[in-house]
Image (spheres, helix red, strand yellow):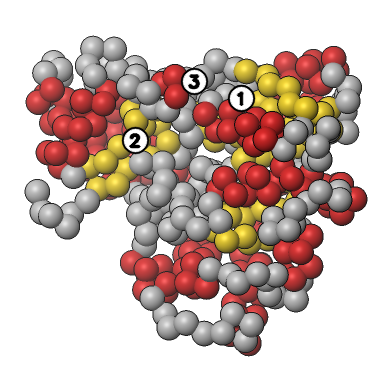
Amino acid sequence: MLQDQQYLRIPGPTPIPPSVERAMGQPMHGHRGPEATAMLENIRTGLKKVFGTKEEVVIVAGSGTAGLETAVVNVAKPGDEVLVLVTGAFGDRFAKICESHSIKTHRLDVEWGQAFDPEKVKQFVQQHTDIKAIFSTYCETSTGVLNPIHQLAKSVREVSDALIIVDGVSCVAGVETNMDEWGIDVMVTGSQKAFMLPAGLTFIAASERAWNIIEANPHRGFYFDLKKYRDQLLNNTTPFTPALSLLFGLKQVLQLFEEEGLEQVYERHTLMMKMTREAFKALDIPLLATDKDAAPTVTAVQPIDFDADAFRKLLKQEFSLTVAGGQQQLSGKIFRIGHMGYCSPADILQTISMIEIALVKIGKKITLGQGVAAAQKVYVEGENNE
């Protein structure tokens, strides 16, 4: 293999478009000057479209986990009672963040590989009437599950005024997101997934309901105080030094979304998910999530007759193709293929072809081309249905 040729198919960080790389290479300018002001004004409009909200989307220099902690410390304070819906490793992380801030944390654990049931959440909240906030993941990266957050607020609000806080790190900008319409109170995402940027930015939007809670909370912290960010953003600036190069790239990413059209972006991700899933079905290799619960941005594969980590190692050695492993209780049991951001159906066809060769080399009995043909069929049928 060529030394500099790498194929990155993990659920973040994801490949970066060349035009975004060029944008990030611009010379620095003053982060308090007119250029930065104009750039932030442009970015504000684009981010609202992606989040599906009329509210401001604040930009914090930090990872996705920084965004999760920001959400926690702004909407809840020590002693508050909250519920975390744990459908995988990142739901578990939300719970750990809450617990680290002395917040009384209930967990509703769901079998990994399955989505939560909004009706069960509603029943839990009915039994625990002091719950002030409910935390969930949209796409649970560790399992490749897309949770039905569009139904969550509707179910919960029949019995509670609890805020709905969502980790959308591994899917916002890759799947439809309508914060205002769905009644989501806080949505968090990060730069290194469907936003096609390096890690280092987290984006957070809050509803009017959430802002009322945030403003009344005396324990918002210093750096992660959302009110500081929103107040400064209204003046097209930031409370602290921004990650300027990443903002250059973000402006170009939002331009790419505008050119492709967000609906087309979402359709592309759904098509790549279907191509990937049908390929593994054709190869008779089990998938962790059902078609109903599957995420358009990452697919978790659960082999039963070969070692997942040995297979990943072979892909890396043979083709410089990197796919992700399992986390926590799924470590060594699954591998995960990211298909989000700067990724196309052509990339999926190439990835499946490399996977088939690696399957033969690892000793699995398959017919070469079976998975690729299944993916091709999905693509052709998708084209014919347009």
Tag on residue 113? 3
Residue lying at 29% horizontally and 28% vertically, measured from the top left: 279
- Which of the 4 quarters of the picture holds residue 313? top left
Q: Nearer the viewer, residue 386 or 313?
A: 313
Q: Is 49 or 34 nearer to us in this picture?
A: 34
User: Which of pointers 3 and 1 lies earlier in the amino acid sequence?
Assistant: 1
Look at the image and tell me in which quarter the C terminus lies.
Answer: top left
Of the two numbered discs 3 and 2 on the same chain, state the one appearing first in sequence: 3
Residue 379, given in percent of the width and then of the height, sits at 33, 39
Badge 1 density bin: few <14, some 14–19, many ≥20, Cα 10 Å: many
Q: Is residue 277 visible?
A: no
**Residue topped by disc 1:** 86
Residue at 52%, 29% in the rendered image: 89
**Residue carrying label 2:** 324
Specify whether 76 is left or right of 14.
right
- Callout 3 environment at 10 Å: few (<14), some (14 to 19), or many (20+)? many
